[in-house]
Image: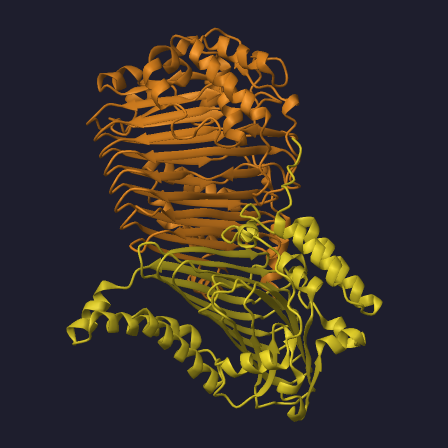
Amino acid sequence: MPAVQETIDRVRSIDLDQYKYGFETTIEMEKSEKGISEDVVRFISAKKGEPEWMLAWRLEAYKRWQTMKEPDWARVEYDKVDYKNIYYYAAPKRPAAMSLDEIDPEILKTYEKLGIPLREVEVLEGIAPERRVAVDAVFDSVSVATTFKAELSKAGVIFMPISEAIREYPDLVRKYLGSVVPVTDNFFATLNSAVFSDGSFVYIPPGVRCPMELSTYFRINERDTGQFERTLIIADKGSYVSYLEGCTAPKRDDNQLHAAVVELVALDDAEIKYSTVQNWYPGDNEGKGGIYNFVTKRGDCRGNNSKISWTQVETGSAITWKYPSCILRGDNSRGEFYSIAVSNGMQQVDSGTKMIHLGKNTTSRIISKGISAGRSQNTYRGLVSAHRKATGARNFTNCDSLLIGDQCGAHTVPYIESKNASAQFEHEATTSKISEDQMFYCQQRGLSNEEATALIVNGFVRDVLQQLPMEFAVEAQKLISISLEGSVG
Amino acid sequence: MAEITPLRTAAETGLTKLFEATKMKYPTGVSIAREEAFRYFEAVGLPTRRVEAFKYTDLRTAFRDAAHPAEMPSSEIATAALAAAKGFSEIEAVRLNFVNGHLITEASDLGRIPAGITVTPLNEAMTKASPLLAHLTPVRQAAENPIYQLNTAFLADGAVITVAAGAKVETPIHLRFVGAGTEAFSTATRVLVVLEEGAEATILETHEGPDGVAYQPNDALDVVIGDHATFRHARLNAEGREAVALSTLSARLGAKSAIETVNVVVGAVLSRHQVYLNFAGADANAVVNGAAMLNGKQLADTTFLADHAATGGVSRELFKTVVDGAATGVFQGKIIVQQAAQQTDGKMMSACLILSDEGQMMNKPELEIFADDVACGHGATCGALDDDLLFYLMQRGLPKAEAESLLVQAFLGAAIEAVSHEGAREALIGSVEAWLKARG
């Protein structure tokens, strides 16, 4: 069939060099010694001026990690990380900035290039002042700036780097840290617990609707470093918060490790909406370089009527190993997972979710759209389980895969475990290629091949894009078209 | 960190002893195959939940002890056991009767085999090292399965059935397996069916045995389906209540061939039926259905794998499970579409009705797709009987139990309908009715 040949040619011509965030910032950095040891853990803890309990927590994690084995059940193949050969801590050398003016101009430039506003003024004077976003910018191992802190604190919202929170709100952090993702959870989470350096901490007090979107932008810059951020979000009774996360990294030939842990806690009637646009450097055409994205994300609907919603657009990373999950503990709690995972080139994605129904009348919904192109492998892996006491649990899962080109793979590995009669689970999955009828229809109406594909793909992922906050939706749509550019026949 | 090698269980050690003790003299090739199969099994051991393919069915726990392989029964025992066997007995068929895993030649219809078919007892084929044995293990993946390898290692008897090119055999061949005894025993049987080009045949299988005896049947059916050939198969598992029953169907499909297989489970405390299909030729067609009715502490596992290696394969799978009491239903299905298998069309559906508070269902429907021009899908549902439907029926004057039965029957019927052989279909629907009646 000629169309297939054409597709193959196009796939061959894919140029992953279109990754536009691949530049590197030259800046003086302070690093821990290479490799991991108790001393490095102590060094990081000391750098952060942490209390004794935090150091003990880290050391415990480190001890545990040494006894653990890297998981190999995911459908990804990669050269194992040499844990002795990376830096676990890298921070810009300049002393911690008190205001934006004190931040290294190079870093400011970096974020400008990435299109992330770190200057509140600009945003305030912007054309649409009503859509403001507070930003926490994390550069390698440290948070370099957090905007709108003052205004947020007026509402009682705490939004700050987690290293600061450990010092300023030790009781809050101590109560919740590790309560969703225990120290012993898995290999990468345990490693993160030992060496995490920064990330965001959010606390929304009871009854407060967070006045603006919160967001964190992660940037890996330094060579041979791993980024281990830790995010903790607590939505107290009746509160609401929408949180966005974005990530980029420079182009490099070697692989870099990103092993983050994100914990969400929603108490009674609270709601957390967590959106991610993941655009780490995916490596080049031949699969050289790129980020290993090994992330543990989990939300705990601890209170009754609480809700946690994950939305992710995954276009970057060489290897993705990521399963944002919800523990539906509170009665009537709700979990949602909306995901678009696009893989191209030699990328490998193994992502999905877990919905663990423990409370009564809990509901969950999973909408996952995987698009694979080039020579990539894209796997959806998910678990839906209802425990004996989770009466009235409901789940709806839909995972669709779209294959573009005949060199890629799309896989689904769902686990559906129902342990009581009143639980009602529905699962459906399909895999297909873009139908020729649809293409023909669009082309007949004057769209080019590429435009038609873009239109159909956009329709395919619409359910998920709708869940993203506005600014992100636009960005995500662009991202998807960029990462599929040149891959369609 | 060093790998932890689990201690060998009593059953594993027992199996090793039994293997050494019961080794029979066969020509070299056969002996080597058995030896290799056992060494494979020995290396992996009885699978636990940590083995992904056995995540929901823990054979290490199920097999406390290795039961002694059953010996050829006396003719009185065999006659009595066969007289008591009920499954598919109303059906006009050519019967091959097995008691405790041994073909009872004098009680079988070896004298009236229809034209176009040959039947050789497996024991004889092994003793004579029949070249037909080269057709054993038609699907590669089955050889990586400890249950199947255990079957190979302990093979005692079975049959080799060939259907000549172009022969369209109307009369079904009924493989009747009956267990008899008062103490635990194990059986290992294998039936190999080779359909030559354009051949058509129907194989019916029933498995029955005594309640209250923890016997361990392990049976395998290897099928090689030639180009344009059609294989129809209906299987009834009505094993005794304490049986731990393992079975494997592996089939290789030639170009434009077709397979229809329906497995109905009512018996055994633990059963695992594995189906391996290899779409070796283009445009092959498969219908694989299953219906399981479970109560008490039963666990029924259906593990299915379709490996599409050629273009244009069509597969339809429908598995229905009804769970009552504290029973557990397990479905693991996987459709693999290799890069060469363009235009594959695969649909896999698993549906479960849970009738009790303690019942549970585990579903794991997988897709593994390397070709782009395909239409593959799977669905899985799980839930209780629809209250609205119940209400509708009760409003029309049906008592609740009857309304429930009607709905369950319709639910399971959808999977059984695919059986082409009318008598077998009716008998299987009869088994659903009997199960519902016993439920009360």
Is the residue A135 above or below the residue B82 in the image?
above
Question: In the figure, is residue B137 to the left or right of A429?
Answer: right
Q: At 22% from the left edge and 63% from the top edge, which residue is drawn?
A: B387
Question: In the figure, is residue A310 to the left or right of A9?
Answer: left
Pick the quarter of the image with the C terminus of chain A.
bottom right
- Spot the yellow chain and give its letter: B
**Residue B112 coordinates in the image, percent (x, y):** 64, 93
Is the residue A145 above or below the residue B231 in the image?
above
**Residue A420 coordinates in the image, percent (x, y):** 33, 52
Is the residue B423 above or below the residue B327 in the image?
below
**Residue B275 visible in the current orientation:** no
Residue nearest the viewer, comparing A279 with B278 = B278
The residue positioned farthest toward the right in the image shown: B28
Residue nearest the viewer, comparing A45 with A114 = A45
Give the colour scheme shown.
Answer: by chain
**Residue A448 coordinates in the image, percent (x, y):** 49, 56
- Spot the orange chain and give its letter: A
Question: In the figure, is residue B379 to the left or right of B334?
Answer: left
